[in-house]
Image (cartoon, grey):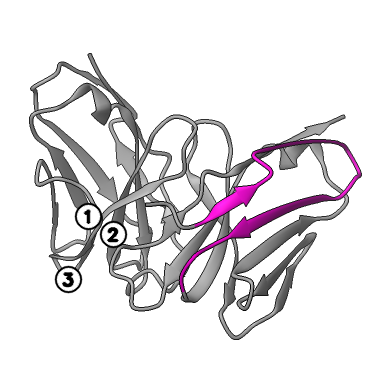
Amino acid sequence: SQQGEEDPQALSIQEGENATMNCSYKTSINNLQWYRQNSGRGLVHLILIRSNEREKHSGRLRVTLDTSKKSSSLLITASRAADTASYFCATDARGGADGLTFGKGTHLIIQP
Amino acid sequence: DAGVTQSPTHLIKTRGQQVTLRCSPKSGHDTVSWYQQALGQGPQFIFQYYEEEERQRGNFPDRFSGHQFPNYSSELNVNALLLGDSALYLCASSLEGIRSPLHFGNGTRLTVT
């Protein structure tokens, strides 16, 4: 079953704007990770946030984690055409024995 | 420093046949995980290999099996192929399990006709 659920399913914005994607999950986690996938390619790891962390930054990326609401958000600032891709959250469930659980992803389109 | 490599890139098989997919992990990584990604969906965990043993397994039937070699490379075997097995199969490597970030290959696109 897919624990992570991203919202929205698709997002189209103008270059230079900020993009925000949300992820909800169901069980307790060790960490939550965000990945990017360009069409038909493998996934690229963006950022990992541990269950005891609330916010993390990496370049133009900002991730927040609210374990009480079982949710996370990914903010991409000053978007570029090259940011066009699908973005997935993945959870490492505490006590889980089934690898990382990915959501269905948010498809982000940056219009020039 | 080579990343994760998978072969072949594309494969077409007939229902009922068997297929073997191959993966070489990123240099220095000792753990290999396999994922199945259907069109428009997120990857689903098949299994993970560490020290040549299957350490974790997702909700996939026994038709899906794997192997890890002493050089950490891995194979995914699928028997008695079904039309529903058509998907992108992704290999990911990491250091000692899933609590470190996964490095993915570009996948093998399997089409079952």
Mark 1 burial class by Cα count in 10 Å: few <14, some 14-19, many 20+: many
Q: Amino acid at mark 3?
A: Glu
Please give the name of the residue rendered at 13% of the width and 58% of the height, measured from the top-left corner.
Answer: B69
Q: Is residue A58 visible?
A: yes
SS under mark 3: loop
> Is the residue marked by circle 2 packed among few (<14), some (14-19), or many (20+) residues within 10 Å?
many
Q: Are marks 2 and 1 on the same chain?
A: yes
Q: What residue did someone put label 3 on?
A: B51
- The answer to which of marks 3 and 1 sits earlier in the sequence is 3
The nearer-to-camera label among 2 and 1 is: 2
Front-most of A70 and A111? A70
Residue A23 painted magenta: yes
Q: Pointer 3 indicates a residue of which chain?
A: B
Number of the label disc, if any, that sits on residue B73: 1
Tell me which label, 2 or 3, sits earlier in the chain: 2
Q: Give the percent coordinates (x, y) of residue B64.
A: 14, 44
Element carrying mark 2: strand
| Residue B1 visible in the shown view | no
Q: Tell me: B87 left or right of A14.
A: left
Instruction: Give the extent of the magenta segment.
Output: A4-27
Q: CB of mark 2 within 8 Å of CB of mark 1?
A: yes
Q: Quadrant of residue B56?
A: bottom left
Location of residue A51 (image quadrant): bottom right
Q: Along the line of sight, which residue is nearer the eye, A80 or A67? A: A67
